[in-house]
Image: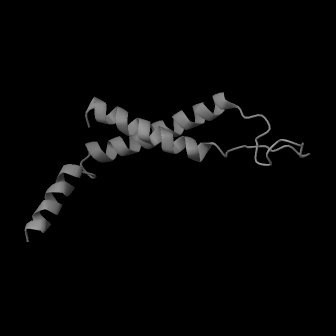
């Protein structure tokens, strides 16, 4: 995996992870106030959300990196196999 493809994979994983992390520890107001949507979080801690997202993305990226570098997951081999099957 090259540096540029590693960065691209990390960014994609990070954006997917943020949508998984956003609902963690969300607290809603006990009393519904007029003009406030019912799903609005009480006091979101964006620093904690960014930290959890980054940590999760790092762990997932390391797993993907290990799979690609160990050749367990080889997109080049998969493309060649598909090309061979198409010729048959």
Give the quadrant of residue 29.
top right
Q: Residue at x 48, y 38 (%)?
A: 14
Q: Would you place residue 63 above or below residue 82 in this image?
A: above
Give the quadrant of residue 63.
top left
Q: Residue furthest front?
A: 35
Describe residue 20's horizontal placement relative to residue 16 as left or right.
Answer: right
Q: Position of residue 23 (x, y in %)?
A: 67, 46
Q: Position of residue 2 (x, y in %)?
A: 25, 33
**Front one among 23 and 59:** 23
Q: Residue at x 66, y 31 (%)?
A: 46
Q: Quadrant of the N terminus?
A: top left
Q: Would you place residue 81 above or below residue 50 in this image?
A: below
Q: Position of residue 60 (x, y in %)?
A: 45, 43
Describe residue 35's horizontal placement relative to residue 65 as left or right.
Answer: right
The chosen color scheme is one colour
Count the numbered circles shown.
0
Q: Quadrant of the C terminus?
A: bottom left
Q: Residue at x 28, y 52 (%)?
A: 73
Q: Residue furthest left?
A: 87
Q: Residue at x 76, y 48 (%)?
A: 39
**Front one among 8 and 52:** 8
Describe residue 71's horizontal placement relative to residue 17 as left or right.
Answer: left
């Amino acid at each position: 995996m090259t540096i540029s493809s590693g960065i691209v994979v990390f960014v994609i994983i990070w954006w997917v992870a943020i949508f998984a992390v956003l609902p963690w520890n969300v607290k809603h107001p006990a009393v519904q106030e007029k003009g406030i949507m019912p799903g609005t979080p009480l006091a979101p801690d964006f620093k904690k959300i960014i930290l959890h997202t980054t940590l999760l993305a790092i762990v997932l990226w390391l797993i993907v990196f290990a799979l690609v570098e160990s050749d367990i997951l080889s997109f080049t081999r998969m493309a060649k196999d598909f090309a061979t099957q198409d010729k048959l």
